[in-house]
Every structure is written in structure tokens, then in C-alpha cells.
Image (cartoon, grey):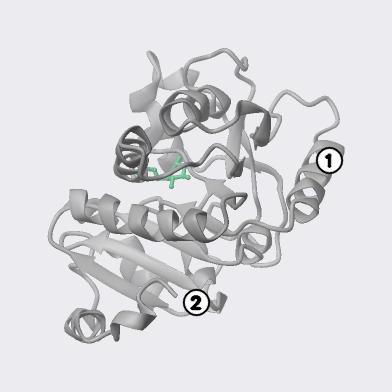
Amino acid sequence: MEIIILPTPEDVGRVAADLISSVVKAKPTAVLGLATGSSPLDIYHSLATRVAAGELDVSQASGFALDEYVGIPLEHPESYAAVIARDVVGPLGMDPAKVRVPDGRALDIEAATAEYDAAIAAAGGVDIQILGIGANGHIGFNEPTSSFASRTRIKTLAPETRAANARFFDDPADVPTHCLTQGLGTILDAHRVVLVAQGAGKAAAIAAAVEGPLSAMCPGSALQLHQHATIVIDEAAAAELTLSEYYKYTYANKPAFQRFE
Ligand code: GLP
């Protein structure tokens, strides 16, 4: 794992966007793994600014979202299909036909989730997966006790996740109880992964994911098994890491030619 600790949340978004830009510039048809939630918003803003300035073209790239709620209509403003369209596809000028979100309304969930994993594989796999992390350590909607081998499937949302996401809904009771999410095994298949986190509320989850034991109780710890995972966090989210000085030293002394390789 590469751990990059930066002063501000804006720095986190910019540096993670640098990484994603470098992937898309090297491969304009790159497959992007798209995350929702607040954490990646600065990444999308930073990428959108580059697109608007003519410095980056994402129109040939394709995308697969991490997850989707079950039980809310597609046109609901908080369905992840709507969020991805609004926050990512539009601002980045991606081709909507090339971006997929798991189908939370599928009648045959098992077939739909198996087909989703098959579609990712058929696209050649995800070139770079963007991730946030929940305060309970979840990535995607892989809640604690998710198998490290899991594939895209239906999950029950943890009570703390429903509470955290209540801010997006008029009534906390409106937060769906179930979701479809790429599995930890699906996420680990991505060619590279960039996880971003900001703020003190993520400090314990980051410490558990980066320095804790491999444990299904912290699904983010599965990233320790990935060959090419980059964790970009601000000082507040880094507060509970025991080796933060070492990570800063390592990043400051990284040979220029290795940056984002
Ligand atoms: C959400 C999403 C995750 C996200 C996490 C943290 O519910 N399913 O993909 O990383 O929880 O959310 P946020 O970035 O808003 O803190």
C-alpha cells in the first residue's frame, strides 16, 4: 500500500485526480471504477475542471459503479444511478452509454449481479477503482463480516450506514435497507485502487484498514492484499495511524519516475 497524507481535503481530491488523469491519459479507453458518497466529490470536481480546461478527455473511458440501493426508483435523486449521472458522467463528459450501475430493480438479483461481474471482466477489468471508506470500515457497501472473496451481490445495510446516509433523504426511514455492491473480491480484481478519506470521522477506519489485521470486521483491510493500492488521506483521517511519519517520509522521498506508477 502507498499511503499519501496531505494537509487538506482539497489536496486529497487533487492528488487522487492526478492519479486518475495519468491512467486515462495513458489509456483513453480506461475502465473507471466509480464510487458515490461525499469522499470522492473533490476528485470529480478536480477532474471536471481539467476536462473543462481541455487538459483531459474522458469521453472514451467507460465506468462501472460500485454499488446501488435496492428498493428506490431509478429516477429517485439519491439512487446511485442518478448520483453517478449528476456528479460524474455529466461533469466529466463521459459517454452515458459506457457507464453502468448495478440494477437495484432487477427481478432476478442473482442473475443481474453475476452479469455485472461478467461485464466488468468482459471490459478487461477495472483499470482504476475509486473508493471511499465508511466509518465502520466498509468499502462499496461491503459491511463488516463481508467475505474477502465476495462478488457483486445483495447486502443488508448496517444500521450505522443507514444512519450515515440518512442525510441524503427527507426521512431516515426512507433510507433503503438493502443494496447491491461489488464484492471485496470484485474490488480486489481492479488493476489499481485509489481510496480517499477526509476528516476525523474516518481516522479509526483508516487505521484499521491500513495497519490493523486483515479482518472481515474491517472490509477496507482487504486492500492490504492488493498489489497496487494507493490511500490518499488528509491529516485528520491519518490521526490514528502509528506510522504516519514513515508514510510522509516515504512519499517525500519517492523517486520522481515512480510517481503514480
Ligand atoms: C457510502 C458508499 C461508499 C462510501 C461510503 C462513505 O454509503 N456506499 O461507497 O465510500 O459509504 O461515504 P462518504 O464518502 O459519504 O463518507
Residue at left 35%, top 36%? Answer: 48
The quadrant of the picture occupied by the C terminus is: bottom left
Picture layout, residue 61 above or below residue 243: above
Choose top left, top right, bottom left or bottom right for residue 15: bottom left
- Disc 1 is placed on an element classified as helix
Where is residue 83 shown, x and y percent of the image? Answer: 47, 26
Report the side of 142 relative to 205 (left or right): right
Q: Mark 2 points at which residue?
A: 224
Where is residue 258 shown, x and y percent of the image? Answer: 38, 81
Chain-order first, disc 2 or disc 1: 1
The quadrant of the picture occupied by the N terminus is: bottom left
Q: Residues within 10 Å of mark 1 (few under 14, many from 20)?
A: few
Where is residue 184 shown, x and y percent of the image? Answer: 62, 60
Residue type of the residue flagged with mark 2: Gln
Residue at left 22%, top 68%? Answer: 5
Residue at left 34%, top 39%? Answer: 41
Picture layout, residue 72 above or below residue 158: above
Decide which of 60, 117 is in the foreground and name it: 60
Q: Name the residue under label 1.
A: 110
